[in-house]
Image (tube, rainbow, N blue to C red):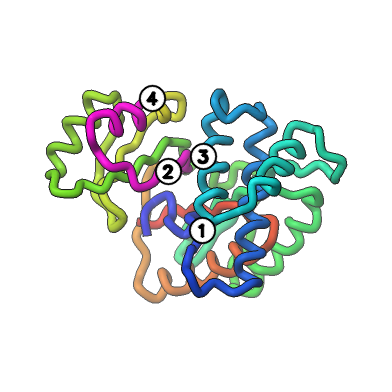
């Protein structure tokens, strides 16, 4: 697991069941709606552009995406969905930050409290763990024959803050407001960008025992099953 948790990435497989596909579309729809609250034009709204890209990669129908955008900009007639963050403590004192999109925050809070309780951990109050994270752009580069040093040099030239290796490839970290510019410069330099997102990075990642990691993985999976949850972040290395 990385500090900003790759559990946040939605699972895609050819054998996905109708139920899982429905859950996937629901989360993607909410992510698009929330992003569209800051502007419905993806050319000027990076977060919305990323949410639309993920929705298209999951083969979500264009009509669904358009409705989600209109709902976010206030053109839809359905109940307003709002962004909400919930914070809690996992096994070994690990920190968990949950991004949700909900039209009923009280229901979402109740569901999450039940999930945490069933796993013998607890939710915290506002700012109980969020101070442990900071928003960063995360661009994963597939080196395809290039060395880490080659990627680092290209990332430095593009204005990146940090470069590190991960199971997914080479991660390039940026300031949120420089994320889109750095990504475009990396692509222009000939590097293959396999994924990119705005994420919450742990300032000081912690290490858990193998048993605690297993418990945390089970907990995060349960949290992700809650229909309003969009993304789950942890501070576990």
- Seen in the picture, residue 168 relative to 48 is either above or below; the reply is below
Left/right of residue 123 with respect to residue 237 in the rendered view: right
Dot 2: what SS?
strand
Magenta span of residues: 181-201
**Upstream in sequence: badge 2 or badge 3:** 3
Report the residue marked by disc 1.
10
| Percent position of residue 98, x then y | 59, 52
| Percent position of residue 125, x then y | 66, 48
Asked if residue 188 lies in the magenta stretch, the reply is yes
What separation in Å lies between label 4 and label 3 (alpha carbons)?
14 Å
Report the residue marked by disc 2.
201
**Upstream in sequence: badge 3 or badge 1:** 1
Q: Based on the displayed image, in which of its 4 quarters is residue 88 positioned?
A: bottom right
Of badges 2 and 1, nearer the viewer stands 1
Residue 50 bears which disc, if any? Answer: 3
Q: Which of 59 and 104 is in front in this view?
A: 59
Kindly check if marks 2 and 4 are in contact, taking CB atoms under 8 A apart as contact.
no
What separation in Å lies between label 2 and label 3 (alpha carbons)?
18 Å
């Amino acid at each position: 697991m990385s500090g900003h948790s790759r559990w946040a990435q939605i699972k895609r497989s050819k054998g996905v069941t109708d139920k899982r596909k429905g859950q996937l579309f629901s989360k993607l729809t909410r992510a698009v709606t929330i992003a569209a609250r800051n502007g419905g034009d993806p050319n000027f709204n990076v977060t919305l552009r990323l949410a639309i890209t993920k929705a298209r990669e999951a083969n979500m129908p264009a009509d669904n995406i358009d409705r989600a955008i209109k709902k976010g900009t206030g053109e839809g007639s359905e109940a307003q969905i709002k962004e909400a963050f919930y914070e809690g403590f996992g096994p070994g004192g690990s920190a968990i930050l949950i991004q949700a999109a909900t039209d009923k925050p009280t229901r979402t809070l109740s569901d999450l409290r039940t999930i945490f309780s069933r796993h013998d951990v607890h939710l915290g109050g506002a700012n109980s763990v969020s101070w442990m994270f900071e928003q960063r752009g995360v661009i994963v580069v597939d080196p395809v024959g290039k060395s880490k040093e080659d990627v680092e040099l290209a990332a430095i030239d593009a204005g990146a803050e940090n470069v590190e290796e991960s199971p997914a490839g080479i991660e390039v970290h940026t300031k949120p407001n420089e994320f889109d510019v750095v990504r475009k410069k990396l692509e222009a330099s000939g590097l293959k960008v396999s994924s990119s997102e705005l994420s919450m990075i742990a300032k000081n990642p912690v290490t858990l025992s193998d048993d605690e990691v297993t418990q945390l993985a089970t907990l995060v999976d349960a949290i992700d099953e809650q229909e309003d949850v969009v993304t789950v972040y942890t501070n576990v290395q």
